[in-house]
Image: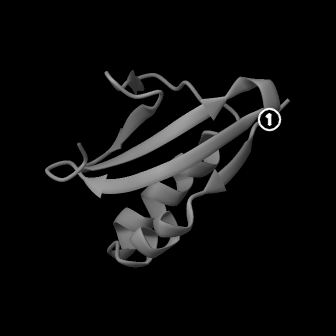
Amino acid sequence: MPYRVELKPSVRKELKELPGTVYDRVIACILSLAENPRPYGMKKLTGEDAYRVRVGDHRIIYEIHDDVLLVYVVRIRHRREAY
């Protein structure tokens, strides 16, 4: 059963600021998290109950709530600002 993907309100603003091709790749990755919230290359963040996945120079930081089948995207940042 696929997970539901929700975006934190600030993530919507971050998405609007991305260049076109990066935006398309990030959206595709976010949508793929519904089918597989733990894709190859995903890393657990130390000190947080969150995960990150790379999309080029950008990072998608998200939480997985298995009990309610939810992926909650909390940040999208360039790699130099992600952590």
Q: Can residue 34 be seen in this view?
A: no
**Residue depicted at x 43% and y 78%:** 16
Describe residue 62's horizontal placement relative to residue 43 as left or right.
Answer: right
Q: Nearer the viewer, residue 28 or 42?
A: 42
Which residue is the site of mark 1? 2
**Residue depicted at x 52% and y 26%:** 39
- Rendering quarter of residue 2: top right
Question: Which x, y percent locates residue 32?
Answer: 61, 42
Give above or below for 44 relative to 20. Answer: above
Amino acid residing under circle 1: Pro
Quadrant (top left/top right/bottom left/bottom right) for the C terminus: top left
**Residue depicted at x 54% and y 49%:** 73
Q: Nearer the viewer, residue 31 or 67?
A: 67
Q: Is mark 1 on a helix, strand or loop?
A: loop
Describe residue 47's horizontal placement relative to residue 9 as left or right.
Answer: left
How many residues crowd around disc 1 within 10 Å: few (fewer than 14), some, or many (20 or more)?
A: few
Give above or below for 68 relative to 59. Answer: above
Count of numbered labels shown in the rendering? 1
